[in-house]
Image (cartoon, rainbow, N blue to C red):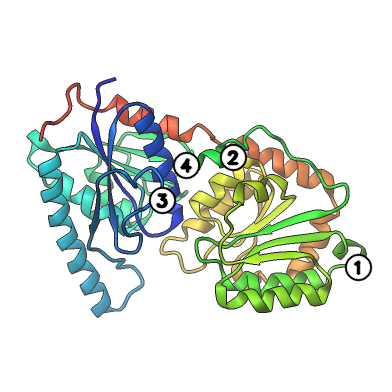
Amino acid sequence: MTRHCIAVAAGGTGGHFFPAEALSCELVRRGHDIILMTDRRAGVRESGIFASRQQFVLPGGGIAGRGAVRAARAAFALARGTMQARRILARLRPSAVIGFGGYPSVPPLLGGSLLPRAIRPMLFVHEGNAVLGKANGFLASRMDAIATSFSLVAGVPAAIPTTLTGMPVRPDIAALAGEGYSPSNGVINLLVWGGSLGARVFSDVVPTALAALPPALRARIQVTQQARAEDVARVSAAYATAGIPAHVAPFLDDVPDRLRTAHLVIGRAGGSSVAELTVAGRPSLLVPLPIAARDEQGANAQALSDAGAAWMIRQPDFTAPALTDRLTALLGDRDLLARTAQAAASLGRPDAATRLADMIEARLPEQPRTA
């Protein structure tokens, strides 16, 4: 394959960055050059695949859910970022730009679409949710192709070529595929995660719910929980009071190992989280983020629930008594957990980075752009 320069647009949270890194590793393995176009929240990457490559931090900001003044400022920042991205792309002339959703994708992809046809790169977005996000929806009509993580994605324009690739996951998560699920014969490992920054609702609800479990069941529980830094002490104390062994931290740096040993996961339903759960083949209780602009997480959780691969609880219903009742039923049924794990694994696509790289390569020009 001819060596091309490909721009990767990703920023914000790990949910956008993990798939961007996984794809970039695959593209570099195939001999391509990578540049990163990101936002100030993510900043310059000092480790990983992007550390030794060109990086550009662009202005921008989210518009959805903001007041008029803040939305106007964000729109102005996006406009400035778009013009900066256009100048950078005109100078470097990559053969393609691939974005992973959210506002950090807008300046590079919109800027690329504004270039003259002779130097316009191929433009792609990857949609990690079962509903096309607002940024991707804004960009979709300008794209040469869209990659998806779900077989059905609401809002995708019929006229744009679409390929089901799955969501690229980190290599150490992809390595969990095919390991299988081992039902508990004693200790029950419960993993509670809440996105990049944790979720306070899990800190408020889960310890109280577990403390109310029947004593014989509670004695078997062992918890790993992600919590915001300001909540770690009180969550740890609640588990200690209940006599439940627990590891509570703001960031889990051993997610693959924790996921490998988990018998049940409680968490949000973001695209990356759902992809990791299905690749690993783990049953989960999903509590979608209630403020998502298009209820993307609700759509993700519903897709897994419909496939028998998870259970969904809307946040207003996610109370300690309700969770106690649900866990009492689930954790007492080893066969149900195993069946749900198997259903989750059937949805996993550990080769998503390969599929996405294939889609991009198939549409690259025969000759690289020359700067």
- Which residue is label 1 attached to? 215
Where's the C terminus, which quadrant?
top left
Dot 1 falls on a residue whose secondary structure is: helix
Query: What is the distance, in whole Å, between disc 3 and disc 1 at their CAs?
Result: 41 Å
- Which residue is label 2 attached to? 279
Q: Is residue 14 left or right of residue 247?
A: left
Q: Earlier in the sequence, mark 2 or mark 3?
A: 3
- How many residues crowd around disc 3 within 10 Å: few (fewer than 14), some, or many (20 or more)? many
Query: What is the distance, in whole Å, between disc 1 and disc 4 at their CAs?
Result: 40 Å
Q: Nearer the viewer, residue 312 or 283?
A: 283
- Which residue is label 3 attached to? 17
Q: Earlier in the sequence, mark 3 or mark 1?
A: 3
* Amino acid tagged 4: Met
- How many residues crowd around disc 1 within 10 Å: few (fewer than 14), some, or many (20 or more)? few
* Amino acid tagged 2: Val
Q: Measured from the top left, where is residue 155 in percent x and y?
A: 37, 49
- Which residue is label 4 attached to? 167
Query: What is the distance, in whole Å, between disc 4 and disc 2 at their CAs?
Result: 10 Å
Q: Is residue 242 left or right of residue 66?
A: right
